[in-house]
Image (cartoon, rainbow, N blue to C red):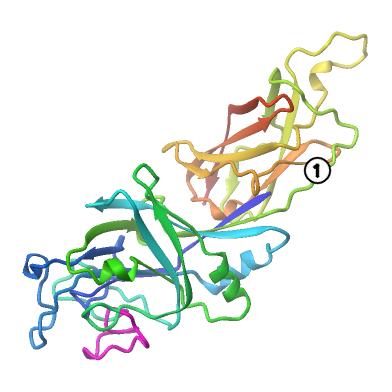
Amino acid sequence: MAVYKIFASADASLYSNQPARNTGLDEILEVSVKNSDQPLNFFVDPVPSEPLLQDDLRRSLVLFSNEDLDKIKTFRTGSWQTNLRLFLANAENLTTQYTLLVGQVSQSWAMGTGKLADNPQTRNGVCWYDTASFTSTVTNWVNAQYYLTPGGGSWTGSFVSQSFGYKDNKDIDVNVTPIVNSWFSGSSNNGLIIKHPQGIENNSGSYIALSFFSVDTHTIYPPTIEMKWDDSSFSTGSLSVISSTNTVVTLGNNTNVYKYGTDKFKFRINARDKYPTRVFTTSSLYTTNKALPQTSYWALQDVKTEDMVVNFDTSYTKISCDGTSSYFNMYMNGLEPERYYKVLIRTDLSDGESWEVDNNLIFKVVR
């Protein structure tokens, strides 16, 4: 099984209460609704010559390059899935249950070089009113849906959604396979828009604020699309399959350091009995390699933060096997460079016991 990550090439936030402002270089993406029955508590008049409108909607645009999408397009074999991942930076006034929408943007846009804190405003890129730069208060977003201030992006097709419960992880991890498949089938790739449902946006009393790390973040949490697909193969040949947890598991060919840009590396797993049965033989029993069961999976953890970079997935991180050993493929292009990573292995044994291996199987990705 395999997982491949691509990183966003451009992004920006759109602000209905500052509809001419560009935020293409901001380190934060906002997906918020800060409407109020007393709007002057929240708003600064963006265009003094125009009436002050009483809404504060904040939507985000994220774009992934066609070059990167073409890379993952070749992986569409068998079962596959793509997820958009955005990592939470801050949250305010969350309800116990809420939903976010992700749609396919229908018009091209220019990222620009503005920030929310720029004074005077930078207006050389996408904004609430315009796809490229502010020219007038007449929006050029076609068929835009908004509350009071015209604009805020345009989209096509159906939204995909992610709902969040009280104790759920608040990072966005939403299945966008239908949208990505549309791009693969010839639709224009103008990126994704992330927003709150219309019922929340059009409520004058709504106030929910979410901030996510952008492509310009100085952290290891930029927006990504994660492609997962089934490339597994399982044939043990002459290898015996382990049947107990009294097994030593290592990575037989781990070189410890890998160059960012290495497309794919096949990690081979050595699994041997910790206490082999005594027999008369001319070779060491401690070198006899065995196969992990077919119900075995790998995961990847960032050593510094202990965040799961790739979680165990019974559909997409299965461990393969051939006549030599168990193995799995790792795509280094989708990992942040200058980081240490730890491989974790989980095996579900035939007796129902689940066994997780954490043997400090560590490697580093360098530039």
Work out whether 46 lies above or below 38. below
| Horizontal side of residue 90 vs 265, given as left or right | left
Magenta stretch secondary structure, dominant: loop
Residue 203's x, y, as percent? 22, 69
Q: Residue at x 38, y 61 (%)?
A: 100
Work out whether 246 lies above or below 57. above
Check if residue 339 falls in the magenta segment. Answer: no
Q: Is residue 214 visible?
A: yes
Q: Nearer the viewer, residue 233 or 175?
A: 175
Disc 1 on helix, strand or loop?
loop
Rendered image quadrant of residue 222: bottom left
Residue 245's x, y, as percent? 69, 20
| Horizontal side of residue 36 vs 138, given as left or right | left
Q: Nearer the viewer, residue 287 or 108?
A: 108
Rendered image quadrant of residue 132: bottom left
Q: Residue at x 69, y 36 (%)?
A: 296
Check if residue 136 falls in the magenta segment. Answer: yes
Residue 45's x, y, as percent? 10, 77
Work out whether 299 lies above or below 241. below
**Residue located beneath label 1 in the image:** 234
| Horizontal side of residue 272 vs 84, given as left or right | right
Q: Is residue 20 visible?
A: no
Q: Amino acid at mark 1?
A: Phe
Q: Residue at x 63, y 28 (%)?
A: 354
Part of the protein shown in magenta: 125-145
| Horizontal side of residue 137 vs 247, given as left or right | left
Q: How many marks?
A: 1
Rate crowding at label 1 as few (under 14), some (14 to 19) or many (20 or more) other CA atoms within 10 Å.
Answer: some
Residue 295's x, y, as percent? 71, 37
